[in-house]
């Protein structure tokens, strides 16, 4: 366990921000928050909350998590690789594929597929069941995803996401005809008080900002391009449902019924921009729309619904 004495210049900082800036620890802020919850971080030998603001002369004890040996099995699951080098692998996640194992999905996930491709070259920061996973997409959201192949890349990309330096662009087909050509939705999102499995717009929630631009109108439907400033759970789906234009096929934030017989939301992570974790080069990568999505847009073009 390592110990650090807080100097006067650092007084008033949040403890998770302070620890994530200690170079020798090389821990992302998200990982620090998890360590605090697990009581692997103490202040003056006492447990604290992640919101605790450190004071001059506080003694902070940090028990750094060791990368756990991954016990998951590699599985030969077809996955499109968009880019790969020694630090990262960027993939096009298909709709219906869960990102990492959880209750009800012990295998058959993106992690299992990535393990088959990368063998033992994955960051251990994500823990035993989430090796290399820096950010996620919902099961039925398709598209581009970055996976870290080592801990340094994991911390770097995590910090870029935290500092809003990663630009994510999504494509969605929604029910209804949106009149505005572009707009910003700024509504806080938190856990629903009615259904703990859902998220909802809530005054007590965390800040959530989504920007959208109309790409095409189809009478009863609108095709949108969406950029998000924040990365709240189900953010795009919650925001669009809240303003009355739910994503087609979304059975959680609308009834999911649609004339295309699509199951699961028509939401695709099309593009991502970020700095390479080692070279610092600005990267812009794109994942093409799934075939079913393209076919529905073609039908809409032809039928003029």
Image (tube, helix red, strand yellow):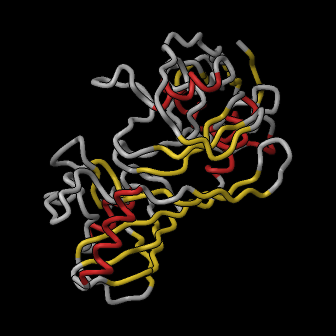
Quadrant (top left/top right/bottom left/bottom right) for the N terminus: top right
Q: Nearer the viewer, residue 288 or 2?
A: 288
Q: Nearer the viewer, residue 213 or 244?
A: 213
Residue 118 lies, with reference to residue 178, above or below; the image says: above
Q: Residue at x 55, y 20 (%)?
A: 46
* Residue 181 coordinates in the image, percent (x, y): 42, 88
Q: Residue furthest front?
A: 302
Q: Residue at x 74, y 16 (%)?
A: 2
* Residue 230 coordinates in the image, percent (x, y): 51, 58
246 to the left or right of 42? left
Q: Residue 123 lies in what quarter of the image?
A: top right
Q: Residue furthest right?
A: 279
Q: Residue at x 21, y 81 (%)?
A: 220
* Residue 210 coordinates in the image, percent (x, y): 45, 68
| Count of numbered circles on the image | 0
Residue 217 lies, with reference to residue 3, above or below; the image says: below
Q: Nearer the viewer, residue 45 or 236?
A: 236
203 to the left or right of 275? left
Q: Residue 236 lies in what quarter of the image?
A: bottom left
* Residue 34 coordinates in the image, percent (x, y): 52, 28
Q: Is residue 35 visible?
A: no
Q: Residue at x 57, y 22 (%)?
A: 115
35 to the left or right of 225? right
Quadrant (top left/top right/bottom left/bottom right) for the C terminus: bottom left
Q: Is residue 120 visible?
A: yes
Residue 175 lies, with reference to residue 27, above or below; the image says: below
Q: Nearer the viewer, residue 208 or 14?
A: 208
């Amino acid at each position: 366990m390592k110990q650090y004495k807080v100097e006067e210049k650092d007084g008033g900082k949040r403890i998770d921000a302070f620890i994530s800036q200690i170079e020798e620890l090389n821990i992302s802020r998200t990982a620090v928050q998890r360590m605090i919850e697990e009581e692997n971080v103490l202040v003056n030998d006492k447990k604290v909350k992640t919101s605790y603001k450190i004071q001059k002369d506080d003694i902070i004890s940090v028990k750094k998590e060791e990368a756990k040996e991954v016990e998951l099995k590699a599985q030969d699951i077809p996955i499109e690789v968009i880019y790969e080098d020694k630090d990262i692998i960027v993939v096009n996640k298909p709709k219906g594929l869960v990102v990492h194992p959880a209750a009800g999905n012990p295998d058959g996930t993106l992690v299992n597929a990535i393990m088959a491709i990368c063998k033992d070259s994955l960051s251990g920061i994500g823990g035993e069941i989430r090796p290399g996973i820096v950010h996620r997409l919902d099961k039925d959201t398709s598209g581009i995803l970055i996976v870290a192949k080592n801990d340094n890349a994991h911390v770097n990309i995590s910090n870029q996401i935290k500092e809003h330096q990663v630009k994510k662009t999504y494509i969605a087909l929604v029910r209804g005809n949106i009149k505005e050509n572009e707009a910003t939705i700024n509504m806080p999102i938190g856990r629903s008080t009615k259904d703990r499995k859902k998220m909802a717009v809530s005054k007590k929630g965390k800040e959530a900002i989504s920007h959208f631009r109309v790409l095409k109108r189809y009478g009863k439907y609108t095709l949108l391009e969406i950029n998000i400033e924040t990365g709240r759970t189900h953010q795009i789906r919650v925001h669009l449902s809240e303003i009355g234009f739910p994503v087609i096929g979304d059975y959680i934030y609308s009834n999911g019924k649609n004339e295309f017989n699509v199951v699961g939301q028509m939401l695709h992570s099309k593009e991502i921009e970020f700095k390479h974790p080692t070279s610092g080069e600005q990267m812009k990568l794109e994942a093409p729309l799934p075939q079913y999505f393209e076919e529905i847009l073609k039908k809409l073009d032809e039928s003029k619904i």
